[in-house]
Amino acid sequence: MNVPIHPHAWLDRDHATGSVAGVRILDLSRVVAGPLCSQMLADHGADVIKVESRLGDETRHLGPPFIEPGQAAYFSALNRGKRSLELDLSKHDDRAVIEALLVQADVLIENFVPGTMEKWGLGYEASLSKKFPQLIYCGISGFGAVGPLGGQPGYDAVLQAMCGLMSINGDINTGPMRTGIPIVDIVTGYNAFAGITMALLARARIGHGQRVDATLFDTALSLLIPHAVNWMASGKTPGLWGNAHPNIPTYNRFDVGDGQMFLGILNDAQFVKFCKKIGRDDLAIDPRFQTNMSRIENREVLHQAMDEALKPFTRAELCKSLMDIGIPAGPVHNVAEALEQAHVVARDMRVKRPDYQGLGLPIKLSATPGQPGRKPPKLGEHNPEILKRDKPD
C-alpha cells in the first residue's frame, strides 16, 4: 500500500538547534505527562509530531480560560513547539501512516491503557522493535502492564491518594489533601524525558533502541522522601504535616506583620543567626531549642514563640535581610506575585510573545541552549504538510 505521507514529512535535521536537535518524535500521548515530556524535548530541538484523534487532546477542552475557541489555556502549557496530525487510529489506513512515519522516527511516546497498542498491531515487543530496531518506545501509564494493578487506568489525584502523598499533605483541619498541582503527572513527564534521553545516549553505544517504561504509580512512590525511609527506620506511620517538615522544625511557614513567609532554617548555626536578626537571642540559648532534636521535641512552643517574634516585621524586608545573611526565606506569594518577580525576567522563566504566553525552560544548557518553540498547534493544523491528503477519510 502506498501510504500517503510527504517524503519530507519530518523537518530538516540540519536546521534544528538544541541538545536533541533533529531527534524525531512521534507523540501519541494526551493530557499531561506525555505532552509535557515531548514539549521539553521540542524546547531542546526535537521535531515533534503530535498525533490526535478527531476529538483532540482532552486538555484542549479543559477550560475556561480559552486562548481561542476549542483551545484551552491548559493545552497551551503542554504543547508548544509541535505539529498536530489528526488521525483515527482505529482505522487500518491511519495506523499505516504511523508506521510510515516511524521509518524515520527516533522516538515514539504513548500513554494509552496498556494493551491498546498491541490491539492495533503497534506493540513494541511483538511488532515495532522488530520493524524499527532503532526506535525508542516510551510507554507512559498509570500502573504498567504487569502486577495486580497492571493495565488499570491511572489519574494524578488517584495516585496521590493510593501512594500516600495525600496522607502527608494537609493538616488536622483539612484532612488529607492532594497537592495543588498535578505533581505525579508532571514528575512522570520528567521521568519519561530522562528515560528517553538516557535511551538516546545508550542507543549510540549499544546500536539499537529500547522500551522506556514510566508509570504514575512508580513516580508517586518515589516522591515519598523522606517519609518512606522515616517509616522504614522507625515503624511509625507518617501523618499530616501541613507546611511543617517531619525532620526539621524550623522549616515551616510563619506569620509576619503583613502576611506569611516560609523559613528554611536547616542547622544550628542558621538558627542562632536567625534569633540574633529578629532580636531574640534568648531563643538560641534556651535548652529546649539548642539542637535540632530538642527543637523537634518542643516544636509547638517554638513555633508559637517564633510567630510572636515575627509580628513586627514585613515579609519582603525580613526575607531579603535573612537571605542576605545566608538564611533561606521567602514570602508566600500567590501565582500572580510569583510570576511578576524581577527574577522571573532574569531567569527567562516567562515567555511573552504576541502569539503565545507560557513558562520558560527550567533546564538551561550553556553550549546547546533550548528555546520555546512555535505556538501550540490547532487540531490537525499540519495534516496538509505531513500527509498527501488534507484530511483522513
Image (cartoon, rainbow, N blue to C red):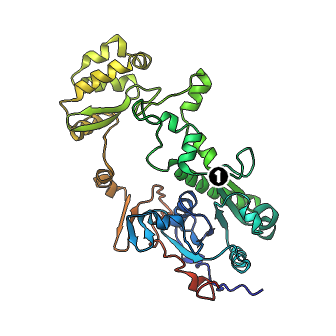
Quadrant into which the C terminus falls: bottom right
Q: Residues within 10 Å of mark 1 (few under 14, many from 20)?
A: many
Furthest residue in direction top, as rendered: 287
User: Would residue 217 be found to the left or right of residue 183 on screen?
Assistant: right
User: Would residue 111 be found to the left or right of residue 1 on screen?
Assistant: left
Instruction: Kindly tell me whether residue 173 is visible in this rendering.
Output: yes
The quarter of the displayed image where residue 275 is located: top left
- Tell how many labels: 1
The quarter of the displayed image where residue 217 is located: top right
User: Would residue 2 be found to the left or right of residue 393 on screen?
Assistant: right
The quarter of the displayed image where residue 267 is located: top left
Give the secondary structure at mark 1: strand
Instruction: Kindly tell me whether residue 264 is visible in this rendering.
Output: no
The image shows residue 161, relative to residue 11, as above or below, that is above
Q: Which residue is mark 1?
A: 214
The image shows residue 270, relative to residue 166, as above or below, that is above
User: Would residue 260 be found to the left or right of residue 192 on screen?
Assistant: left
The image shows residue 242, relative to residue 293, as above or below, that is below
Furthest residue in direction left, as rendered: 312
Q: Kindly identify the residue that appears in the image at 45 percent across and 66 percent down.
A: 76
Q: Kindly identify the residue that appears in the image at 63 percent across and 77 percent down.
A: 87
Question: How far across and how far down the image is residue 92, in percent?
Answer: 74, 78
Quadrant into which the N terminus falls: bottom right
Question: How far across and how far down the image is residue 7, in percent?
Answer: 66, 85
Question: How far across and how far down the image is residue 350, in percent?
Answer: 36, 60
Question: How far across and how far down the image is residue 51, in percent?
Answer: 60, 72
The image shows residue 99, relative to residue 321, as above or below, that is below
* Residue placed most toward the observer, 174 or 128: 174
